[in-house]
Image (tube, rainbow, N blue to C red):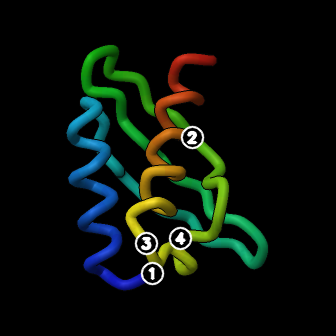
Amino acid sequence: MPKQAIEKLKIELAKNSLRLLDVYRFKNKDLLRVLDLTSRRVLLIESPLQLTSIASSDDLAKVVERITQALKEK
């Protein structure tokens, strides 16, 4: 994933009081380690698509939505 896309993901997560800590890349999936700034919990979330394939703001919104949804579930 280009550095610019990671920076955009960090900005979108910051709008939801979240901070991207790490990205673990595997052959068929990406895992994101995210800190919830309000509850101070660290979550390990599987990305709905590989971050290297993010090409549009819609894809970015899908990733952010999945992260916020996983936060509500836990």
Instruction: State yes or no: discs 1 and 2 in contact (Cβ < 8 Å).
Output: no
List the residue tagged with mark 4: 51
Q: CA distance from mark 1 to mark 3?
A: 12 Å
Left or right side of 32 for 18? left
- Left or right: residue 26 compared with residue 57: right
User: CA gap, disc 1 to disc 2?
Assistant: 18 Å
Q: What mark, if any, has residue 56 been given in the picture?
A: 3
Q: Earlier in the sequence, mark 1 or mark 2?
A: 1
Going from N to C along the chain, the mark reached first, 3 or 4, is 4
The residue at which mark 2 appears reads as 66
Q: Are marks 4 and 1 in contact (CB under 8 Å)?
A: yes
Q: Earlier in the sequence, mark 4 or mark 1?
A: 1
- Residue 6 in picture, x, y percent from top left: 33, 69
The residue at which mark 1 appears reads as 1
Amino acid type, callout 3:
Ser
Where residue 66 sits, quadrant-wise, is top right
Tag 1: amino acid: Met
Q: Residues within 10 Å of mark 2 (few under 14, many from 20)?
A: some
Numbered disc in front, either 1 or 3 = 3
SS for tag 2?
helix
